[in-house]
């Protein structure tokens, strides 16, 4: 597998600091990643230097990340919709009925297979945001180790904003509100979750976008916490399960629930620019 090479240019504010501090405080390298590039992995203006070398304005810094063994993901060509891409990250619009990762017993094309074909070479698939097979919308993928580490920290620190859209049975009495209800696994080994006092804290915010002629609502949903199946469990809990939700609502043969990650806001791992990605689901009113 090819090594990953990152190129940076020092700014005025970087003058006088050591390479180690530049990597840690400017580029947000973790201590473990600094250790991996410490011996021969950093060039300053084309010359290999130690972590004690001093940076000056305009210096060219080249960091070669160590190789990682690529996953055994087969490339599968498909119509991959790219929402955003640069040298560090890739965001795609995942369709329904597509798992994010390959798994035992699954024979469907996954996001990993499609991205592998799109990139065109072996790689380590690093999905920062993941969606269930039947949930569509934005999936964010890191293209290198550094971006993956920084984005994972940002996600855990609550620096991501995610908005989902869902079609539900009926319409909540209040046009907007907050659901605070702890979620637990229904039983040992079960994939189904339930609201139960001994569960983990779970908070969901909702807002009604529209109500159709049958009285069913399209909602904007924000999962303040990130529990498994949280949005589906909470909507069922207040009496408005997702339409055709086979696990928490009415099972209808041949169709499944409509849930879409339609907005993702997060800091870029390297530039720290606040990025806003939009993906409008087909079931959202077009006006």
Image (cartoon, rainbow, N blue to C red):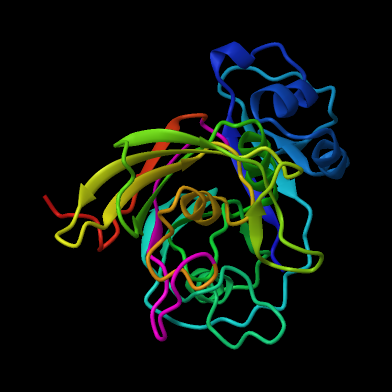
Say above or below: 207 vs 18. Answer: below
Residue drawn where x is 38% and y is 79% of the image: 255
Q: Main secondary structure of the magenta part?
A: loop
Please say whether residue 263 is one of the residues in the magenta stretch: yes
Q: Residue furthest left?
A: 287
Q: Is residue 252 magenta?
A: yes
Q: Is residue 268 visible?
A: no
> In the rendered structure, which segment of residues is drawn in magenta?
248-271
Quadrant where the N terminus sits is: bottom right
Q: Is residue 283 above or below residue 61?
A: below
Task: Please report the residue visible at 69 percent of the width from the left and 87 percent of the height from the top.
Answer: 105
| Front residue of 153 and 116 | 153
Look at 72% across and 78% down and name the residue there: 72
- Residue 174, above or below 6: above
Q: Residue at x 73, y 45 (%)?
A: 199
Residue 249 picture location, percent across and down: 47, 66
């Amino acid at each position: 597998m090819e090594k990953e090479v990152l190129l940076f240019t020092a700014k005025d504010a970087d003058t006088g600091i050591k390479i180690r501090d530049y990597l840690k405080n400017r580029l947000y390298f973790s201590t473990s990643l600094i250790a991996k590039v410490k011996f021969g992995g950093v060039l300053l203006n084309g010359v290999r230097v130690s972590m004690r070398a001093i940076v000056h304005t305009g210096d060219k810094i080249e960091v070669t990340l160590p190789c990682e063994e690529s996953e055994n993901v087969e490339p599968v060509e498909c119509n991959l919709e790219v929402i955003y891409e640069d040298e560090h990250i890739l965001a795609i619009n995942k369709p329904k009925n597509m798992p994010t990762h390959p798994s035992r017993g699954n024979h469907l094309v996954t996001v990993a297979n499609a991205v592998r074909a799109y990139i065109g070479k072996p790689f380590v698939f690093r999905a920062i945001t993941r969606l269930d097979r039947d949930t569509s919308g934005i999936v964010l993928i890191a293209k290198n180790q550094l971006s993956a580490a920084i984005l994972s920290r940002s996600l855990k620190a609550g620096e991501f904003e995610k908005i989902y859209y869902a079609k539900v049975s009926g319409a909540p009495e209040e046009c907007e509100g907050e659901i605070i209800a702890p979620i637990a696994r229904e039983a040992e080994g079960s994939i189904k979750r339930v609201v139960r006092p001994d569960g983990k804290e779970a908070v969901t915010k909702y807002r009604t976008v529209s109500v159709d002629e049958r009285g069913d609502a399209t909602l904007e949903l924000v999962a303040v916490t990130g529990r498994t199946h949280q949005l589906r469990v909470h909507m069922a809990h207040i009496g408005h399960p997702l339409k055709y939700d086979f696990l928490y609502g009415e099972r209808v043969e041949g169709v499944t629930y409509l849930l879409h990650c339609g907005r993702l806001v997060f800091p870029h791992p390297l530039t720290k620019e606040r990025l806003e990605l939009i993906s409008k689901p087909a079931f959202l009113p077009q006006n």
